[in-house]
Amino acid sequence: MADKNPVAYAEGHLGVHTLWNHAQERFEKYEAALLRRASLHTELRKIRDVQTDAEMQIMQDGKAKYAEISATAFEKIYKTLVHENQDHQKLRMEERERQCDLDLVEAEISAHEYQLKLMNSRLIELGGLLNFYAAAKRV
């Protein structure tokens, strides 16, 4: 340890404060990603609720239009009605987009968690090293 001042050594040579700042910045990004994930889950729930309502409306309209056919025959027609409905197609597309966004945020969260674990390990290692230096200096 070339420096006589242990704080200067910890800051200058080991970069303890710099690592701490990076960890704080990473944690803020992690928190923001968690909030984005929660927001995307809320959006997906709303989209799925609207989809369910749209499907019920399609069913009601279809039953009114095809009142004379059997339930089995209507099930086949219903699937086609849902698939061909423009509003429902838009909702499915929007749901897929939100799901892709959610998948990206999940990957981002995993990356942040991994980096935070590495930074935490490094800070613990540096703390142990500084304790060792302090103990060695006392001897």
Image (tube, rainbow, N blue to C red):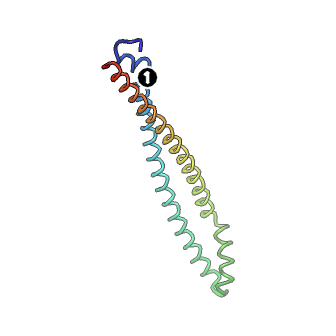
Say which residue label 1 marks: 15
For label 1, the crowd category at 10 Å Cα-Cα, with few meaning under 14, some 14 to 19 and many 20 or more, is some
Percent of width and height locating residue 19: 44, 28
Name the one closer to the observer, 59 or 125: 125
Percent of width and height locating residue 48: 53, 63
Percent of width and height locating residue 28: 42, 38
Q: Does 107 appear above or below 94?
A: above
Name the one closer to the observer, 97 or 127: 127
Name the one closer to the observer, 38 or 25: 25
> How many numbered dots are placed on residues in this image?
1
Q: Does 82 appear above or below 120?
A: below
Name the one closer to the observer, 58 or 119: 119
> Which residue is pictured at 38% across the width and 12% down the height?
3
Q: Does 6 appear above or below 118?
A: above
Q: Does 87 appear above or below 68?
A: above
Report the amino acid beneath label 1.
Gly
> Which residue is pictured at 39% across the width and 21% down the height?
10
> Which residue is pictured at 45% across the width and 32% down the height?
122
Quarter where residue 134 is shown: top left
Q: Residue furthest left?
A: 138
Quadrant for the C terminus in the image: top left
